[in-house]
Amino acid sequence: MTESHLSGRPADSQDLYFFHSYAQLPGVAAGLRAPDERQEAFHQLLCQFVLQLTTHDGETPIGFLDKRMPLGGEWEKHLKEALATCRVFMPVYSPRYFASHWCGIEFDGFLRRQTEHHRSERYTVSAIVPVLWTSPGRIVLPDVVQQFQYHSLDLGDDYRHMGLLGLMEAGKWRVYRRTVWRLAERIVDVATAARLKSCDVKLFDDLSNVFVPGTQGDS
């Protein structure tokens, strides 16, 4: 990341760069999501790489990964604040993701924020960076996400065919790390280009699951 990328962003070192939106595994206790060691390992590596590419001081989280279940007002406040301030929304596509009510709500929230931003900044790039967790052949994309590209040539054929989880389970660790590095670069570049404004959390007062056919929220 060059110095020119950072111009005009004096608060760069404190920004929450990305919101890691993923589907929980079954089996929940004590208000926590079931542990997903693969998602957490991916998140930690991605955070390390984004730190390397930015001037973030690491004293506050650079990425948001929710490990709690939606159990009431405190959870909603925590999640909505992250949705309202993150620079990039990173949905992790899998069969479970698009079957998840809560993932559909998170997606709705960020779409609303992005739509609000585009009212004053019409030509801003999208700040949504999808990630393939499993093979795309196992995923049915809802209409609302069709416009967001999840693959580019620089991410490689193995990733396109297998997704990140497939790379891990096949032991393709060198390819996996290279892919995560390139995703980190994309997140930083998109955050810089989009310059997405924070929003009032009141924008999220009546969120709905936009993955349900015929439900598009305010996007």
Image: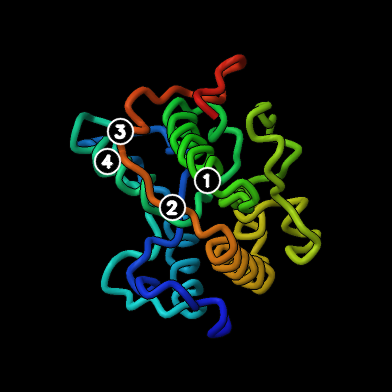
In the rendered structure, which disc, 2 or 1, sits on the residue that comes first in sequence? 1
For the image, the number of numbered tags is 4
Q: Nearer the observer, disc 2 or disc 4? A: 2
Earlier residue among tags 2 and 3? 2
Residue behind mark 1: 120
**Number of other residues with Cα within 10 Å of mark 2, as a class: few under 14, some 14 to 19, many 20 or more:** some
Q: Tell me whether circle 3 and circle 4 mark residues in contact (CB < 8 Å).
A: no
Residue placed most toward the observer, 170 or 61: 61
Give the foreground label among 1 and 3: 1
Q: Amino acid at mark 2?
A: Lys
Disc 1/disc 3 C-alpha distance (Å): 18 Å
Residue furthest to the bottom in view is 3
Query: Is residue 185 visible to the viewer in this orientation of the structure?
Result: yes
Q: How is the image coloured?
A: rainbow
Query: Mark 1 or mark 3, which has the lower sequence index?
Result: 1
Query: Which quadrant of the figure contains the C terminus?
Result: top right
Q: Are marks 2 and 1 in contact (CB under 8 Å)?
A: yes
Estimate the spatial distance between the alpha carbons at disc 2 and disc 1, rounded to whole Å.
10 Å
Q: Nearer the viewer, residue 143 or 8?
A: 8
Give the label, 4 or 1, closer to the camera: 1
Residue holding disc 4: 32
In the figure, is residue 120 to the left or right of 47? Answer: right
Quadrant showing the N terminus: bottom right
Whether residue 146 is situated above or below residue 152 in the rendered picture: above
Q: Which mark is residue 197?
A: 2
Of labels 3 and 4, earlier in sequence is 4
Contact (Cβ within 8 Å) of mark 4 with mark 1: no
- Helix, strand or loop status at disc 1: helix
